[in-house]
Image (cartoon, helix red, strand yellow):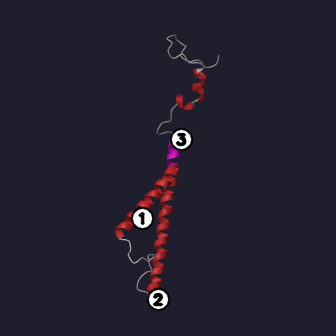
Amino acid sequence: MGSWSALGSNEPGCARQGAGQESAAMGAVIRPLQARSPIVLSAFHSALVKQLLLVLAVLALAIAVNVVRSIQSRRLAAAGALTFPSTSRSPFPEPIARRILRIGFGLLWVLDGMLQMR
């Protein structure tokens, strides 16, 4: 007859046939993971190291961009240029507060996308 369920029955032993086979196959049901389990701790530490590497990579990229921009600025100052060339050629430049908001929301959108990929 295989495995069958008589949930409404009051007879002892009739609740489920083959229940021992199912619980033996599902190890997490018999012995759940604890917070101090080596498996949980190693997974946590692995995720923590990956996140640390990501933060360090972003920080290194920001520092590299800053170094390149400062080198360019010093070269232009040595050549006699008064200002660093901007990318904006518009007669009505974007207000700084709007630019900060636009860039901030863009970075938040990228961060949200990276978190959803995980």
Residue marked by disc 2 = 79
Foreground mark, 3 or 1? 1
Q: Which mark is residue 103?
A: 1
Q: Earlier in the sequence, mark 2 or mark 3?
A: 3
Q: CA distance from mark 2 to mark 3?
A: 60 Å
Are dots 2 and 1 in contact, CB under 8 Å? Answer: no
Element marked by disc 1: helix
Labels 2 & 3 near each other (Cβ < 8 A)? no
Q: Main secondary structure of the magenta part?
A: helix
Write the residue at 60% across / 28% down. 25
In this image, 17 relative to 52: left or right? right
Q: Is residue 43 above or below residue 75?
A: above
Q: Amino acid at mark 1?
A: Ile
Q: Where 96 falls versus 113 (above or below)?
A: below
Q: CA distance from mark 2 to mark 1?
A: 31 Å
Circle 3 sits on which residue? 39
Mark earlier in primary sequence (3, 1): 3
Local packing at callout 2 (Cα closer than 10 Å; few below 14, some 14-19, many 20+) is few
Say which amino acid is labelled 2: Ala
- Considering the numbered disc 2 on the image, is that residue within a helix, a strand or a loop? helix
Residue 93's image quarter? bottom left
**Spatial CA span between label 3 and label 1:** 40 Å
Relative placement, left or right, of 97 versus 36 is left
Q: Position of residue 30 (x, y in %)?
A: 53, 28
8 or 36: nearer the eye?
Answer: 8
Q: Is residue 93 left or right of residue 6?
A: left
**Most foreground residue, 102 or 75:** 102
